[in-house]
Amino acid sequence: MEKLDRIEEELRKYVLGQDHVVARVASLLKRGELGLTNASRPKGSFLFLGPTGVGKTELALSFTRYLLGEERLFRFDMSEFMHFDSVKEFIGHSGNPGRLGNVLENNKAGACLCLLFDEMEKAHPQILLLFLQMLDAARITLGNGRTYDLSGFYIVFTSNIGSENILQSKRVPFATIERSVLAQLHLELRPEFIARIDEKIVFKKLEYHTQREIAVLLLERELSRLRDKGYALSYDDSTLEFLVRKGIDRIFGARPLRNAIERHVQDALARRIIAGKPPVGVIRYCDKLRDLIVVNI
């Protein structure tokens, strides 16, 4: 019970700037874990709407890791299954369980899993019909003829539908943006599919203060990893400002930030080591180099 009581607080450590989303997700997860949701449907189903890099996939990963264990999350990029030729690869055929069936076949113990379907709107219409079956009865029959029970699963869909409405909004109340995105959703997806999803949640665009908080979180992880290797580094505000500029993208959000942090921090440390200087110090932005450097404390 204590774990469920802390779930919202824990998820907010990893998904920043989306407190309204975390609250609704935590509420459904609590009901699902307590067995209060409809037993003839999945434990909980979510549709996360918003631009790339705002925390949709990270939230699915975070709640699965916290409740079930990271190994219980299975992600499918639905942009790989847009065409008719790819449908059989996903749902299987004549003895072949397909990509989804492989996951379900290997779940011999009937453990609770989280199935994450990224960019679900790109899936072939035949797969969307399978999703409808999955949500309606928590059972699916795949191309190999086998029927699988998903009543103990969490199902997460992500979608970029309506993302431009979010990205282009300036000084528009979030409630107005949310209505616009959900209206777009109803234009693009079948109403019976939308109606069967427990929580349809719109993510906010990342504000600058949230971008900095995410940069701090990822930078601290990278410095902790380097500290384990014997490199004692700290940083100042100029480092954060530089990394936010380099790692936050209008289209891709915070997704490129991790790579930007690893590349620029590791390059700065590599230059210091190659110069024969001790691998300790403060990371700062250098105007002349237009990159990060490590200076003496």
Image (spheres, rainbow, N blue to C red):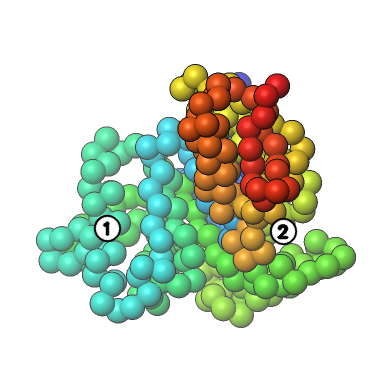
- Frontmost of labels 1 and 2 is 2
Between 249 and 291, the residue placed more toward the observer is 291
* Horizontal and vertical percent position of residue 134: 40, 59
Residue drawn at point x = 27 percent, y = 58 percent: 99
Q: Earlier in the sequence, mark 1 or mark 2?
A: 1
Residue drawn at point x = 69 percent, y = 54 percent: 245
Between 171 and 188, the residue placed more toward the observer is 171
Q: Which quadrant holds the N terminus?
A: top right
Give the answer, above or below, for where 12 lies relative to 196: above
Give the answer, above or below, for where 220 lies relative to 60: above
Q: In which quarter of the image is residue 107?
A: top left
Q: Does residue 147 appear in this view?
A: no
Q: Does residue 266 appear in this view?
A: yes
Q: Which mark is residue 205?
A: 2
Q: Give, as a three-letter code, the residue at label 1.
A: Arg
Residue behind mark 1: 99
Distance in Å between CA atoms under marks 1 and 2: 33 Å
* Label 2 Cα neighbours within 10 Å, binned few <14 / some 14-19 / many ≥20: many
Give the answer, above or below, for where 81 lies relative to 293: below
* Horizontal and vertical percent position of residue 233: 61, 26
SS at circle 2:
loop
Q: Give, as a three-letter code, the residue at label 2.
A: Lys
Give the answer, above or below, for where 164 lies relative to 116: below
Residue drawn at point x = 67 percent, y = 64 percent: 250
Q: Which mark is residue 147?
A: none
Lateral position of residue 25 relative to residue 147, left or right: right
* Horizontal and vertical percent position of residue 89: 24, 66
Q: Quadrant of residue 110?
A: top left
* Horizontal and vertical percent position of residue 290: 67, 50
Residue drawn at point x = 27 percent, y = 35 percent: 109
Residues under numbered marks 1 and 2 in contact, where contact means CB atoms less than 8 Å apart:
no
